[in-house]
Image (cartoon, rainbow, N blue to C red):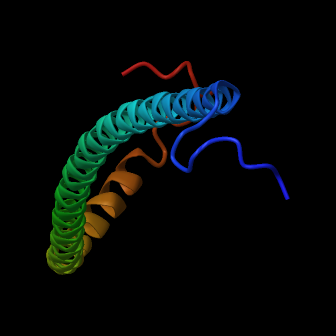
Amino acid sequence: MPPKTKEKGKKTGAQKKKQNAGADVEAKSAHRRTVLEKELLQDHLEMSRQCRALQKEMEIHSRKLEEEVTGLREQLETCQREAEAARQEAEQALGERDQTLAQLRAHMADMEAKYEEILHGSLDRLLAKLRAVKPQWDGAVLRLHAKYKDSPVWAQPPGSLKL
């Protein structure tokens, strides 16, 4: 057993130095821990600020993209409506054109039939008049033939005939 040199509660100088040295180490360690925690908290604070700033930036960018998508959808819908209207208009124009062509063809066929009827009627009347006049012409031709049959005019070679 160690010899009892001093009373309980009283410490020697070496023990006090050891105790002070231990307390200094603990104080330095605690101080260092506090400094590191402070730096850690400051880093955490700066990172939190950066994170919030990035989140805000992302929200702004996201909103802009959503607005752009909305605008593009509206443009697409407008273009689709215009295309549908143009398609319907073109179909209507083609239908009207086809109807007009059919009417014109029918009108042309009708006119053709009428002109053919008029032509046949005119030719029939002309033939009837020719038939009516033919006996008179035949008689006139026979008389002329008989009159000039022995005439010296017919005895001349062609091209030398002078009237």
Q: Is residue 4 left or right of residue 94?
A: right
Instruction: Decide which of 56, 67 is in the foreground and name it.
Output: 56
The x and y percentages for residue 131 are 23, 78
Q: Is residue 148 above or below residue 145?
A: above
The x and y percentages for residue 56 are 26, 41
Outermost residue, right side? 1
State which quadrant residue 28 falls in.
Answer: top right
Instruction: Decide which of 68, 150 is in the foreground and name it.
Output: 68
Q: Is residue 89 above or below residue 120?
A: above
Q: Is residue 141 left or right of residue 86?
A: right
Write the residue at 39% across / 56% down. 146
Instruction: Decide which of 86, 97 is in the foreground and name it.
Output: 86
The x and y percentages for residue 30 are 51, 35
Which quadrant, please, contains the N terminus? bottom right
The x and y percentages for residue 126 are 18, 71
Write the residue at 19% across / 79% down. 106
Write the residue at 24% across / 62% down. 80
